[in-house]
Image (spheres, rainbow, N blue to C red):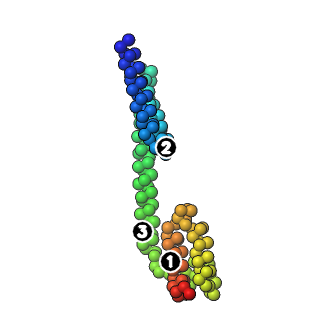
Amino acid sequence: MFLRLLLIIAVFTAVFYFRKRWQNTPPENRKALLLNWALWTCLAAVTIMALTGRIHWIGAALALCVPFAKQVGLWFMQRKLQGFSKKDSESQAVSTAPLDEDSARKLLDLDADYDRSSVIAAHRKMMQKNHPDQGGSDYLAAMINQAKEILLKKLGPKK
């Protein structure tokens, strides 16, 4: 009888706590809060099942390792991405030689008789295709920007 009363009090306390927490959480963070609660509920259920003999302790230990495996996987992905960005910046440092007018014109796919508006239009077209936010490389975007600057400098100040 005492154990049931204690369980009922614990359930009411948990409901009150979760309700307050839900109300105080901004709407954009509620999904993460629900996922967090679901994870802790599953972990508690597995622990109770292991303690009452309904699941073998090895199965419970494996189930408890799942959230940690996710964190380890995220850590490895971050390390891998840091390695890629480091290699990318090293390759940029090696090959950032300034462009000459001819190579800048070829990079933007312009004829020899270009003007200011055609340079700007060609730059816009190339950046739409090669922008890093669209899956292009930072290096190529920097080269396209450098080509635009070189050609606009050669044309002189805006009239």
Q: Amino acid at mark 1?
A: Gln
The mark that comes first in sequence, 1 or 2, is: 2
Q: Amino acid at mark 3?
A: Glu
Q: Secondary structure at mark 2?
A: helix
Residue at point 61%, 80% (across, down): 117
The mark that comes first in sequence, 2 or 3, is: 2
Identify which residue, 28 or 147, lies in the foreground: 28
The mark that comes first in sequence, 3 or 1, is: 3
Q: Position of residue 119 (x, y in %)?
A: 59, 80
Q: Amino acid at mark 2?
A: Pro
Quarter of the image that includes the N terminus: top left
> Distance between the Cα atoms at labels 1 and 2?
43 Å
* Left or right of 6 on screen, residue 140: right
Q: Nearer the viewer, mark 3 or mark 1?
A: 1
Residue at point 45%, 66% (across, down): 88
Q: Residues within 10 Å of mark 2 (few under 14, many from 20)?
A: few
Q: Is residue 88 visible?
A: yes
Q: Secondary structure at mark 1?
A: helix
118 over 21 or under it: above or below: below
Where does label 3 land, which residue?
90
> Distance between the Cα atoms at labels 3 and 1?
18 Å
Identify which residue, 19 or 82, lies in the foreground: 19
Where does label 2 land, which residue?
27
Where does label 1 land, which residue?
146
Identify which residue, 51 or 17, lies in the foreground: 17
